[in-house]
Structure formats: C-alpha cells, structure tokens
Image (cartoon, rainbow, N blue to C red):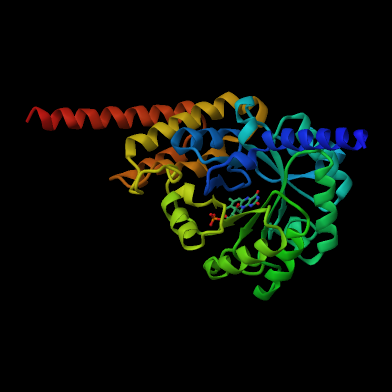
C-alpha cells in the first residue's frame, strides 16, 4: 500500500513537472500561432515577426523524418535551425509516413530543446501525399495514430495540424474524431479539405460542430483554427463567435501585414516600419547565411511584404529584384531614404 501511494505521488509529481514544461498549457486564451510555412518561417523570418508583433507560439517549416533518418542534417538543411531564446515557444513541425523515422527525429528535437512536436497531416503537395505523408494520412488513420504514438516516445507534447478530410467535406467528423482519440495536446484544423487546396473560403460554419466533437471525445485537447484569418482582431472575432476555440493560427496574413499579431487596430502598416523590418531581415539573412545556405534569390520573395503601399513602391521593388547581394539592397534603400529627405527639405525651404 505504502509503495502504491509513493508511486502515485511520484507519478503526480512527474505529470505536474511535465505540465510545468508544457508550452501549450501556459498560453493565453485565445492564443495565436504563426503558421508553419515552408521556405518562409525559418529562423530569420520568425525573428522578424517576433520584432514586429509576436504571436504566442511558432512552428518550424515542415521537416521530413525519413530524410533525417537516412541522411541526417544534410537532408533537412536549416529547417530546424533556431536560437536558444526561441526554445520555450517553438514547436518542430515534422512530416513523414514512417513511425521509426518519426520517433528518431522527435528524439532529436527533444535533445535540441524544442517545446513540442507537431505532425503535419494536411500538406496537399504531391511529394508528401504520394509517399503517404501530409494530407495522405487522412486516408490512413491507422498510420496516423502510429506516427503520433511514435512522436510521443520523445516525451514532448505532441500536436497535429490537419485539414477537414481528403476529398469530401463530410469526412471531417470521422477523421478529426479519430485524431481526437489519440490524446494529443492540440489539434490545428485548416478548415478545408485537401481537394479544396486554398481555392474556396475556409469552412468557418463547421467550427461549432468541431468544438462539440472535441468536448465529447477529448475535452483536454486544445483546438486551433486556421484558414484565411487576417489578423488578431479577425481571430478574436471568430473566437468570440465560437467560444470553445482555444487558439488561432495565421499564415498568409503576415504577408499582407507583418504586424498582424499586434493588439493595435489593423491599418495599413507604416512604410518606415516596413523598411526597418526589411533591414532587419537583410541583417539576419547575412548572419545565418553560412548555416542556412539559402540562395540570395530566395530572399527576393520577401520584398513585396516590405515594399508596398507608397508611391513608386513598384519601381523600388523592381530595382531590388535586379540585385545580387544584401549590400546592393541596402545601397538602394539608402539612396531612397536620402532622396526622400532631400525632397522633404526642398518643400520645407520653399
Ligand atoms: C508558402 C506556404 C508554405 C506552407 N508550408 C507549410 C508547412 O510547412 N507546414 C504546414 O503545416 N502548412 C504549410 N502551409 C499551410 C499554412 O500553414 C496554412 O495552413 C495555410 O496557409 C492556411 O492558412 P492561412 O490562410 O492563414 O494562410 C504553407 C502555406 C504557404 C502559403
């Protein structure tokens, strides 16, 4: 009897200890997450967004477990690169269809001090689906459960990000119900099917039904909604309408407004602030270049986030697209700033 009591006390302490270190359990309600986006949400862009207006949690770009198992670091490049100060708020997003590989990469993430593992079960890309991973898992619930179990062996909180189903909208109840039975910490639902890609509006009309399914099957699992959410204000409006929702994930919204996680009423972002973010992005690109080895060309897709909504923005963007180094970008930005201040001076002395 004494042994049993000691065991129970030990177990309770262990669970309390795990809870204390579980990033998902100390989040505000609602919490906000920057969506995982391949070739976007790397160690550089996450720091830019953190500087602009920080969400509560981040996810890495999705990282393939099988690649890791067979080729290690070489296969995953800079996808899991992070700063130590990100540890408590950064979830590693993994994908794959092999539970052994999932377990191995999850253990590596534990060693690297990630705050959790998120398994991608929603990517519609052929490269994921044809190998049985991503949204392909909507058609293989047994494998989906095995992957979750495998990830749990690393003793980190495990969450899943998925879609409503593969091809038909009415698949959602069975598929999400199955995932909710796997005792996961959070289920992020991108409110579309795989077939719908991003071509139809997100199905907000299903949120209440998803919440009541969660309440019936797994009241302890958090639900995060995703799809077409533009800003904190928009997310809060949705949570007010659907009070059981715990979290809001924003992806493409940051392209339109990198300050979208801010509390301030949304408005067109200030040009000077956007240029400041671009300069930060350039500095971070240089800082991590030897580790990420991302070609300069990949930086250009970010220019339209920062250079917009002012006269000649298109011209300036066009000039920047012709550059080959971060120094050339800085020179053009400096010239633009000095042109503007000359103009201001000219009008002030008229
Ligand atoms: C460029 C890009 C890359 C993406 N990469 C990932 C990824 O690595 N993992 C993932 O789960 N979803 C990925 N997604 C999907 C987003 O996380 C999100 O579910 C989708 O964009 C819908 O949300 P939104 O309307 O807020 O953008 C990606 C989306 C975009 C636009």
Residue 156 placement: quadrant: top right
In the rendering, at what x and y percent does residue 193 appear? 65, 67
Q: Residue at x 30, y 30 (%)?
A: 337
Residue 131, visible in the rendered structure? no
Q: Give x and y (percent) for residue 49.
A: 49, 38
Query: Residue 64, position in %: x, y?
Result: 77, 45
Identity of the residue drawn at 76% across and 35% down:
109
* Residue placed most toward the observer, 189 or 40: 189
Specify the farthest residue to the front: 1
Q: Is residue 304 above or below residue 284?
A: below
State the image coordinates of residue 220 (x, y, percent, origin top left).
68, 52
State left or right for residue 237 relative to residue 183: left
Q: How many marks?
A: 0
Between 183 and 65, the residue placed more toward the observer is 183
Instruction: Please tell me in which quadrant of the rendered image residue 308 appears.
Output: top left
Q: Is residue 319 above or below residue 233?
A: above
- The foreground one among 110 and 255 is 110
Q: Is residue 15 above or below residue 132?
A: above
Q: Is residue 347 left or right of residue 38?
A: left
Q: Is residue 245 left or right of residue 163?
A: left
Quadrant of the image occupied by residue 9: top right
- The quadrant the N terminus occupies is top right
- Quadrant where the C terminus is found in the figure: top left
Can residue 56 be seen in the rendering of this structure? yes
Which residue is located at x 78 percent, y 29 percent?
Answer: 111
């Amino acid at each position: 009897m004494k042994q049993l009591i000691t065991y129970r006390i030990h177990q309770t302490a262990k669970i309390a200890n795990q809870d204390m270190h579980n990033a998902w359990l100390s989040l505000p309600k609602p919490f906000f997450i920057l969506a995982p986006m391949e070739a976007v949400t790397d160690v550089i862009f996450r720091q830019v967004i953190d500087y602009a207006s920080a969400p509560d949690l981040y996810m890495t770009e999705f990282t393939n477990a099988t690649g890791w198992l067979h080729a290690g670091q070489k296969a995953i490049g800079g996808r899991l690169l992070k700063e130590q100060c990100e540890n408590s708020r950064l979830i590693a997003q993994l994908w794959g269809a092999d539970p052994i590989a999932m377990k191995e990469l999850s253990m590596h993430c534990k060693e690297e001090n990630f705050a959790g593992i998120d398994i991608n079960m929603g990517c519609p890309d052929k490269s994921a689906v044809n190998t049985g991973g991503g949204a392909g898992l909507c058609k293989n619930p047994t494998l989906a459960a095995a992957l979750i179990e495998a990830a749990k062996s690393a003793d980190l909180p495990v969450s899943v990000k998925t879609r409503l189903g593969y091809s038909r909208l009415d698949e959602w109840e069975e598929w999400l119900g199955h995932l909710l039975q796997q005792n996961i910490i959070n289920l992020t639902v991108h409110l579309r099917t795989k077939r719908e890609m991003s071509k139809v509006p997100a199905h907000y009309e299903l949120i209440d039904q998803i919440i009541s399914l969660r309440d019936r099957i797994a009241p302890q699992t958090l639900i995060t909604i995703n799809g077409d959410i533009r800003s904190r204000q928009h997310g809060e409006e949705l949570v007010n309408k659907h009070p059981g929702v715990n979290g809001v994930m924003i992806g493409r919204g940051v392209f339109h407004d990198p300050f979208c996680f801010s509390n301030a009423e949304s408005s067109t972002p200030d040009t000077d602030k956007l240029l400041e973010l671009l300069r930060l992005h350039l500095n971070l690109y240089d800082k991590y270049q030897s580790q990420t080895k991302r070609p300069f060309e990949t930086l250009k897709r970010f220019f339209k986030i920062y250079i917009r909504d002012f006269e000649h923005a298109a011209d300036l963007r066009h000039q920047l697209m012709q550059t080959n180094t971060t120094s050339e970008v800085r020179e053009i930005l400096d010239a633009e700033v000095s042109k503007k201040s000359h103009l201001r001076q000219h009008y002030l002395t008229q």
